[in-house]
Image: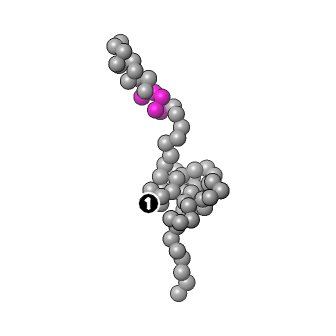
Amino acid sequence: MTPFMLTLTVLVLLSQAIPGSTEKCWNLHGNCREECRKDETVFIFCPSGKLCCVKPKFQPKITRQ
C-alpha cells in the first residue's frame, strides 16, 4: 500500500471514530444532545430523539394575543 493510501485510510477511519460532529437543529442554531448545557434550553426534539438545545437568543418570542 502506498503511503498516501495508508494515510487516507487512517484519516477516514479516525473521522468516523472521533466524536464531536453534532447533529444540528433549529435552523442550524441548535445542537442535538442528550443533555443541554447550562446556557441552553430545550425548544424542540431532534429527529434522532435527542434534545434540540438552543441558546435563548435564538428562540422565537412567544406573544399572547
Q: Dot 1: within a 10 Å radius of its alpha carbon, few (fewer than 14), some, or many (20 or more) residues?
A: few
Image check: 59 left or right of 7? right
Q: Is residue 37 above or below residue 11?
A: below
Task: Tally the marks.
Answer: 1
Residue type, numbered disc 1: Asn
> Which residue is the site of mark 1?
27
Q: Residue furthest bottom?
A: 65
- Residue 62: percent from the left, percent from the top? 54, 76
Q: Quadrant of the N terminus?
A: top left
Q: Which span is picked out in magenta? A: 12-16
Residue displayed at 63% across by 54% down: 37
- The one nearer the camera, 37 or 48, is 37
Q: Position of residue 6 (x, y in %)?
A: 39, 18
Of residues 50 and 3, the one drawn nearer to the viewer in this rendering: 3
The residue located at (61%, 50%) in the rendering is 34
- Indicate the colouring scheme: one colour
Residue 25: % across, % down: 48, 56
Residue 15 painted magenta: yes
Magenta segment: does it hold 51? no
